């Protein structure tokens, strides 16, 4: 629980010496309680005060790092239940399940190379496979060990999905310097794996049949010396899982039990796409996905991108003349609004055509084209003024500007406002129709 | 250390809205008194409903994967409605009168009435009727339909802040449910409901459409605005406690990622499965944020959501009022 101003005041020297910059210790205490000051500013604060404040101001959900090096991933550290309250901060790690049984060395290498090198750019983010969850192969421990080592050598964070304590030890020991995550089989006796994780100083997943059991298992792991813990929530179906996920987040934020203040680990089986969707929306921090292809990865990556976008950031992009590809003086010049969704849709569509373009992003105060037009923010005058400010005339020689189909009514006004030699071409209403439009109309008029 | 999780109680309850009526089967939505899907701490007398979208004319821009289940009945609303309900298990149907749009066929209000009648005769479930969404034509079409189908308890989609009077009047006069659409904006959603109440619309006959952003195209804005609307509703705001309807299928299949074939983007995988996943990953978060009705396009997406929601609401009857 956070401390109140008065509780903090009682821990301060009460000398009103002003070294902190405040007239009284009480004033300083009030600022501390509101989270607007740091205790370091009081040079005379006691050890006791530091400890008490430290515990109270520690994050409600701890951060856990898996892996080392550039691809290491930190999860947790969330502070809110609803993203609109502030923002979700740590995008959940999406790990690919690797069952190396029956794979030849060459096949194993090929698969891991492919996972390491998979990259998809979307709306300013690079989607990658965040790590590899290597399953222990019972009866052939060396198979799992080899796979874990091969994944770690490629710089990929590794989760060890253990079947037995011996197998887990063999795998984790080999790559312990790469900070693997140790995930015991569900409902394994705590002590065994906790001691292993503590000895190797690596993060550990704990699980239990119910929430009190889970919190207790986390406490037991802490006492065994494990510093970094992930919680595997109970839940046989989506409804039960949703209950667990919700209760863990709520319990952590309300600090009802220190055992709940850890990120959440979720295993998704084959045919459980919906579970992954729910997990990404509702607080899971590290998910193991089965042998998925792009048809599963792409929607899940995109969902994560949406949910973890900072809602405090304005929905606007900076007005200006953007280049898609490497446009030249003969490339099309398109106009759109600076509402970020509109911009992203148009930019994505234009990119997909493979045709280089100049994209004039007009200051429409972050409104969509049609809304901006009705509000007078997308008039011919205003668009012309914007085009002049960004010196569009210097960038194209064809003097042709393509406007969104929704505002075809401004074409006359815009032509007049732009003056000598300019012509306005009315484009499609929907961004998704830009490709055929550019292909047919632009190439037909031969302006390029 | 004891672990005590207190259930969260709210002062507000979502309104219950009954769709259909007369000789038509009725379905009720809403009535929940906790955050969406929080069955562990509240009561939900009615489960979320899953609708399928059909169109008056063959749709122009649906990707192949989305039209495939409708082969043979595209642009035949009655036959498509029968397939949606009997074949695919939709709770209800949304007929999109896209072909009445001035730019997409400009079919007349009378054509629209004939299509709606045909669907009403073909299936016993409640019907959502979506207009062309083009200013005056929207009103002309939906007003004629409302008048010709009095007593059927249609869901008229939709009225907006700038233009609600005509549809408010016909919804009241002919006993239909009205969808109040707002552009991902809680204040406008509230303002519109205030305006509708002033126009004598019974708010127990209103649904909110918060405007759906599809996965990758603004889903997060819709998601958060819905969560904020629901928090206000459960907090007791009588102008925001209407059940919510989301056109998830339409927005999902609009996404480039839902349609681009694998040979163009090998990393993106199989396009059919990807499209269906796109729809599921749009719809499920919306249900979790408070959608009481989701309108879908692909029967497989519907079946997958059905499986999850059936488990969730095993003890709740399927909305039958
Ligand atoms: S520096 Fe410390 S002791 Fe001095 S006034 Fe500030 S809080 Fe009080």
Image (tube, coloured by chain):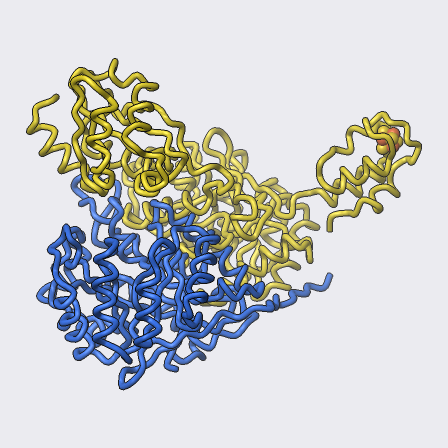
Chain colours: A yellow, B blue
Q: Nearer the viewer, residue B289 or B269?
A: B289
Q: Residue at x 49, y 52 (%)?
A: A284
Query: Residue B284: x percent and y percent?
Result: 38, 59
Residue A174 visible from this viewpoint: no
In the rendered image, which quarter is residue A278 located in? bottom left
Q: Is residue B140 left or right of residue B289?
A: left
Query: Residue A46: x percent and y percent?
Result: 87, 35
Query: Residue B116: x percent and y percent?
Result: 18, 71
Q: Residue at x 57, y 70 (%)?
A: B41
Q: Residue furthest bottom?
A: B23
Q: Is residue A197 left or right of residue A305?
A: right
In the rendered image, which quarter is residue B139 located in? bottom left
Q: Is B114 located above or below residue A144 in the figure?
A: below
Q: Nearer the viewer, residue A306 or A279?
A: A306
Q: Is residue B274 left or right of residue B314?
A: left
Query: Residue B311: x percent and y percent?
Result: 41, 72
Q: Is A305 located above or below residue A357 in the figure?
A: below
Q: Residue at x 32, y 73 (%)?
A: B176
* Quadrant holding the C terminus of chain A: top left
Q: Is B289 located above or below residue A122 in the figure?
A: below
Q: How many marks?
A: 0
| Ligand 1 visible in quadrant | top right
Residue B242 visible from this viewpoint: yes
In the rendered image, which quarter is residue B320 located in? bottom left
Q: Nearer the viewer, residue A170 or A33?
A: A33
């Amino acid at each position: 629980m956070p401390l109140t101003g008065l509780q903090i005041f009682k821990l301060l020297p009460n000398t009103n010496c002003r070294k902190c910059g405040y007239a009284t210790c009480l004033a300083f205490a009030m600022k501390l309680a509101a989270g607007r000051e740091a205790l370091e500013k009081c040079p005379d604060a006691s050890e006791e005060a530091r400890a008490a404040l430290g515990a109270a101001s520690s994050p409600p959900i701890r951060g856990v790092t898996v892996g080392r090096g550039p691809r290491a991933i930190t999860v947790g550290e969330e502070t809110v239940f609803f993203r609109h309250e502030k923002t979700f901060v740590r995008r959940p790690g999406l790990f690919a399940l690797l069952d190396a049984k029956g794979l030849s060395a060459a096949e194993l290498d090929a698969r891991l190379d492919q996972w390491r090198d998979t990259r998809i750019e979307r709306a300013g983010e690079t989607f990658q496979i965040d790590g590899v969850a290597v399953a222990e192969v019972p009866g052939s421990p060396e198979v799992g060990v080899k796979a874990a080592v091969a994944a770690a050598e490629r710089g990929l964070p590794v989760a060890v999905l253990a079947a037995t304590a011996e197998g887990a030890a063999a795998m984790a020991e080999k790559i312990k310097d790469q900070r693997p995550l140790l995930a015991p089989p569900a409902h394994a006796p705590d002590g065994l794996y906790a001691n292993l994780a503590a000895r190797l100083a690596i993060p550990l997943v704990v699980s239990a049949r119910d929430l009190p059991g889970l919190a207790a298992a986390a406490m037991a792991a802490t006492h065994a010396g494990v510093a970094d813990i992930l919680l595997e929530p109970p839940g046989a179906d989506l409804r039960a899982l949703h209950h667990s996920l919700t209760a863990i987040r709520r319990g952590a934020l309300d600090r009802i039990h220190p055992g709940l203040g850890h990120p959440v680990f979720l295993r998704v089986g084959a045919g459980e796409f919906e579970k992954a969707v729910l997990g990404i929306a509702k607080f899971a921090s590290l998910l193991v996905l089965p042998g998925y292809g792009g048809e599963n990865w792409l929607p899940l990556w995109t969902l994560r991108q949406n949910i973890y976008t900072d809602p405090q950031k304005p929905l606007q992009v900076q007005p200006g003349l953007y280049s898609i590809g490497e446009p030249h003086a003969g490339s099309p010049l398109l106009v759109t609004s600076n509402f970020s969704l509109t911009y992203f849709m148009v930019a994505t569509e234009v990119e997909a055509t493979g045709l280089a373009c100049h994209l004039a992003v007009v200051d429409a105060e972050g409104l969509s084209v049609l809304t901006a037009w009705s509000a007078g923010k997308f008039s011919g005058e205003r668009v012309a003024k914007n085009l002049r400010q960004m010196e569009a005339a210097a960038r194209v020689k064809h003097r042709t500007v393509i406007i969104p189909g929704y505002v075809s009514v401004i074409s006359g006004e815009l032509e007049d406002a732009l003056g000598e030699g300019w012509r306005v071409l009315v484009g499609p209403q929907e961004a998704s129709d830009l490709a055929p439009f550019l292909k047919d109309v632009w190439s037909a008029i031969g302006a390029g | 250390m004891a672990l005590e999780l207190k259930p969260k109680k709210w002062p507000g309850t979502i309104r219950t809205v009954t769709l259909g009526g007369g000789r038509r089967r009725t379905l009720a939505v809403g009535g929940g008194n906790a955050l969406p899907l929080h069955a562990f701490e509240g009561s939900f007398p009615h489960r979320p409903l899953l609708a399928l979208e059909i169109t008056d004319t063959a749709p122009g821009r649906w990707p192949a994967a989305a039209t495939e289940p409708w082969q043979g009945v595209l642009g035949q609303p009655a036959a498509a409605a029968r397939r949606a309900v009997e074949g695919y298990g939709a709770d209800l149907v949304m007929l999109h009168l896209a072909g009445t749009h001035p730019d997409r066929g400009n079919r007349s209000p009378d054509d629209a009435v004939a299509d709606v009648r045909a669907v009403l005769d073909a299936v016993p479930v409640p019907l959502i009727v979506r207009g062309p969404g083009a200013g005056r034509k929207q009103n002309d079409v939906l007003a004629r339909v409302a008048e010709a189908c009095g007593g059927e308890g249609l869901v008229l989609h939709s009225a907006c802040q700038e233009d609600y009077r005509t549809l408010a009047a016909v919804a009241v006069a002919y006993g239909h449910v009205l969808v109040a659409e707002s552009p991902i904006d809680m204040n406008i959603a509230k303002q519109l409901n205030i305006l509708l109440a002033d126009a004598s619309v019974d708010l127990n006959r209103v649904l909110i459409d918060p405007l759906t952003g599809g996965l990758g195209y603004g889903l997060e804005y819709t998601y958060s605005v819905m969560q904020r609307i629901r928090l206000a509703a459960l907090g007791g705001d009588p102008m925001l406690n209407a059940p919510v309807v989301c056109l998830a299928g339409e927005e999902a299949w609009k996404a480039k990622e839902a349609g681009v074939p694998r040979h163009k983007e090998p990393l993106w995988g199989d396009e059919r499965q990807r499209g269906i996943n796109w729809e599921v990953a749009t719809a499920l978060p919306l249900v979790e944020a408070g959608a009481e009705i989701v309108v879908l396009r692909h029967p497989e997406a519907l079946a997958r959501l059905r499986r999850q929601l059936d488990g969730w609401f095993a003890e709740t009857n399927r909305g039958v009022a």
